[in-house]
Image (cartoon, rainbow, N blue to C red):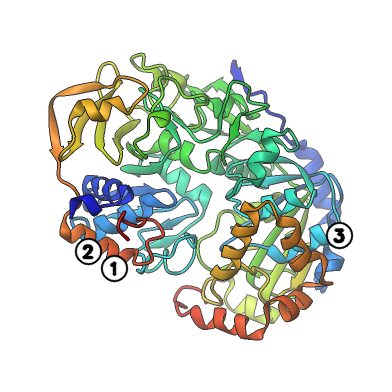
Amino acid sequence: MDVLESGVGEFRFTDPDEVRSWMRTHKGREFVDKTVSEAEAVGRFVADGDYVSFDFSSFTRGPLVLIREIIRQGRRDLWYCAKFTLMESTLLAAAGACSRIDVGFMGLGDTLNRAVEEGKIKVSEWTNGTLTLRHLAGAMGVPFLPTRALLGTDTLKYSGAKVVKDPFGGKPIALVPAVNPDVGLIHVHQADVYGNARCFGPGVSPLETAAASKKVIISTDEIIDHDDIRKDPAKTTIPYYMVDAVVYAPFGAYPGGLPGVYEMDFEHFAGYYAQERQGNLKAYLDKYVYSVGSHLEMLEQRVGLARLNDLRRRATVKEGYR
Amino acid sequence: MTKDDTEAEVMIALCARLLEDQKTAFIGFGMPQVAAILAQRIQAPQLVQVFEFGAIGPTPLTPFVRNTMGGPSNCYRSIAWTSMNQIFAQAQIGLMDYGVLGATQIDIYGNVNSTMLGEDYQRPKKRFPGSGGANEVASYCWKTVIIMMHEKRRFVPRVDFVTSPGYLDGMPGARERAGLPADTGPWRVVTSKALFGFDEDSKKMTLLGVLRGLAPEQVVAEMDFKPLVARRVEELPPPTEQELRILREEIDPARTIIGRTAKA
């Protein structure tokens, strides 16, 4: 195949046979109880320097409980996949936890933009769609997938994509390399103790992220019986053998919402934006991460039952989320 | 009444009028969402909105809630909930009629920059959040509509960074030569003062209409390049009472997107 153009962006890539070998040896097929605390999950499965991906968004069904724990444990040099990210990337950067970002959409607010301007964070340019496609390639066990996006743009130039002549039709086509994240973080509505997981509502790529990632931590608002999974298998989003840890975390998406269960906390976000604009995210992190020992402690001491009940009260649209 | 309209209301109303009923429209975050809902409430009740995280055909609950694009009120009564790979595949195969996007900077060929300002990519003078899904939308949808504030610094001869493709260098067939899907590209640019299209041959941005009360020269004076001007420049009526009522009372009473009037 003739390579017509190559992007100069650095990218994470793992040989598909290495991925297969990992899946063979590390992804247990045994039905074992994988429930652990968020502290144990992050302690065991997230290492300095890891490539980290998540689903779905800071506002909706995002694994914020796990992001906060990563920050609390002081991870460094993470390479964060910012597909559809709004808040997580900013928090990780403000905490000094990540040094590289694959940009789909970097986040709201100027903290990250300034960090890039000052050279503190290295970025590669992608798009939401091509980052998600890279996960699909990683989830399929193939080294790349073709796309008709990126073509003709500077986004391609600063990505790791290549343009080749399509060997079948002859037109130029972009190829994006597979990504197999070291860690996939996914918050779900329900999971059993083995890691069979259900997400309700639209999402970016929960299944692709789980399948592609070497280590997968699921945080879940509810634990359900394994029998319930078998009674309604069409509802299963992620099968258990992809999952390494299950963290029972009610309100795990907080301050984001979980569709049909609780709304996002607008007041919290307003406060967050105000502190972000003042360059005061250290204070935010102190309050919600460093000064509390766990997610439960944060909910009890920094949010409170009245606020949590109100967020549940506001989630009046239930249809489709069961 | 007219002098009370906010710039956002003008942009949203002008954009909403472009969207035909029973068409598919790939909708970006923010103003495009409000324009699509307005179109649904007036001439296009069965406009099929599509979002990048896979929701197809929602009829969003109002008042519009900013931020929760993937949440229950915005995804209310959809036709299907899919995923990002599925929905971009549907756009790539040619099922999306419109793409509606906001933009930071645009050039005469409709190339859009939402990545950075400056000469050096590694050390940008100003960094922005990046493509998001805009590159896909601008690559795949049949007709891309771009909504922008009408400011000189946003309409530049050449964007510093081509985040999402317009007609590239403007040469005939440039998009197809790059490998982009045939017969796609920017179709309209909607601003707070005017409506633009693109010349069929030269692919240059072309002034099609100006807001009532403005002269074409006034509009062009606030751009850093000279667009072509249609032989007959249409007069665009400002937002109607009906449009304003729906925007202010039904969709966005908190005015998070439409903004405040000068008097308020």
Residue marked by disc 1: B250
Q: Marks 2/3: CA distance?
A: 51 Å
**Amino acid found under the numbered disc labelled 2:** Arg
Q: Nearer the viewer, residue A164 or A73?
A: A73
A86 or B165: nearer the viewer: A86
* SS for dot 1: helix
State the CA–CA distance, disc 1 to disc 2.
7 Å
Q: CA distance from mark 1 to mark 3?
A: 46 Å
The reply to whether discs 1 and 2 touch (Cβ–Cβ < 8 Å) is yes
Give how far across and how far down residue A195 sits, in percent. 73, 68
- Mark 1 and mark 2 lie on one chain; the one further toward the N terminus is 2
- Label 1 chain ID: B
Residue located beneath label 2 in the image: B245
**Residue on which disc 3 sits:** A73
Residue B15 is left or right of residue B168, and the answer is left
- Element assignment for label 3: loop
Whether residue A217 is visible to the viewer of this picture, yes or no, is: no
Q: Judge left or right: residue B32 versus residue A229.
A: left
Question: Which kind of residue does numbered mark 1 sit on?
Answer: Glu
Question: Which residue is at the far left?
Answer: B232
Question: Dividing the picture into quarters, in which one does residue A297 lie?
Answer: bottom right
Q: Quadrant of the N terminus of chain A?
A: top right
What subunit carries mark 2?
B
